């Protein structure tokens, strides 16, 4: 299947939000329970790291990076989000989006990409592993969702050229 990957723009938000909602409804994609407004979402997701996969005007999936922390020491650590429309899962959309995020981050001072994934979301764990992410631990009972404590698999991908002082 041929699709393009492009930077996300405000006019994509309606479709991005629908795909995000599909992820929320699975119960295994995020702790979030509702979709934020574009204005709220963009505060934590720099546009240079927000992308969509599309065919013509249809958004198939989206991916974005957000700062892992506001502390200056973590300026090069970003958290990954990848969401694919239910009808386009399993077609390589998520893989291409994640590869593009990695490429975009390479020359931007990012040395670590991290992802927090529910252990039940095996397809996401496999996707991240295909792109060089490694499991660094399990955050047990890190948060409650609908009254149930949930674990999160912490995966990371480190830039190989990090210069240590």
Image (tube, helix red, strand yellow):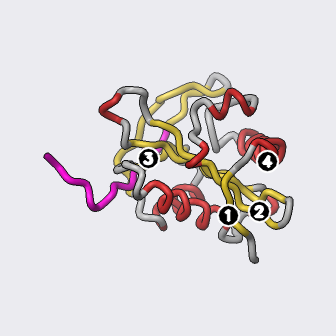
Name the residue tied to disc 4: 12
Name the residue tied to disc 2: 54
The image position of residue 146, as x and y in percent, is 67, 25
Q: Are marks 2 and 1 in contact (CB under 8 Å)?
A: yes
**Along the viewing direction, whichever of 86 and 16 lies nearer the viewer:** 16
Q: Which residues are magenta?
A: 152-165
Most extreme residue toward the bottom is 1
Residue sitting at x 40%, y 57%: 107
**Along the viewing direction, whichever of 34 and 136 lies nearer the viewer:** 34
Secondary element at tag 1: strand
Residue sitting at x 42%, y 30%: 69
Label 2 – label 3 distance at C-alpha: 25 Å
Q: Are marks 2 and 3 in contact (CB under 8 Å)?
A: no
Q: Are marks 1 and 4 in contact (CB under 8 Å)?
A: no
First in sequence, mark 1 or 4: give its number.
Answer: 1
First in sequence, mark 2 or 3: give its number.
Answer: 2
Which one is in front in this view, the residue at disc 3 or the one at disc 1?
Answer: 1
First in sequence, mark 3 or 1: give its number.
Answer: 1
Residue 95 figure quarter: bottom right
Q: Are marks 4 and 2 in contact (CB under 8 Å)?
A: yes
The image position of residue 101, as x and y in percent, is 53, 57
User: What crowding class fits label 2: few (fewer than 14 Cα within 10 Å), some (14-19), or many (20 or more)?
Assistant: some
Label 3 – label 4 distance at C-alpha: 25 Å
Most extreme residue toward the left is 165
Most extreme residue toward the right is 57
The image position of residue 57, as x and y in percent, is 86, 60
Name the residue tied to disc 1: 5
Secondary element at tag 2: strand
Residue sitting at x 68%, y 60%: 6
Which one is in front in this view, the residue at disc 2 or the one at disc 3?
Answer: 2
User: What crowding class fits label 1: few (fewer than 14 Cα within 10 Å), some (14-19), or many (20 or more)?
Assistant: some
């Amino acid at each position: 299947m041929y699709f393009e990957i492009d930077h996300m723009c405000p006019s994509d938000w309606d479709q991005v939000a629908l795909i995000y909602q599909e992820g929320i409804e699975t119960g295994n994609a995020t702790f979030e329970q509702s979709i934020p407004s574009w204005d709220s979402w963009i505060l934590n997701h720099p546009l240079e790291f927000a992308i969509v996969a599309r065919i013509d005007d249809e958004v198939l999936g989206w991916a974005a990076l957000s700062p892992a922390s506001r502390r200056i020491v973590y300026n090069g650590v970003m958290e990954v989000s990848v969401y694919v429309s239910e009808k386009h899962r399993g077609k390589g959309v998520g893989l291409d989006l994640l590869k593009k995020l990695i490429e975009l981050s390479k020359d931007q001072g990012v040395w670590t990409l991290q992802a927090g994934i529910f252990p039940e979301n095996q397809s996401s764990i496999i996707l991240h592993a295909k792109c060089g992410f490694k499991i660094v631990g399990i955050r047990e009972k890190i948060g409650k969702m609908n009254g149930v404590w949930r674990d999160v698999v912490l995966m990371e991908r480190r830039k190989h050229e990090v210069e240590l002082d």
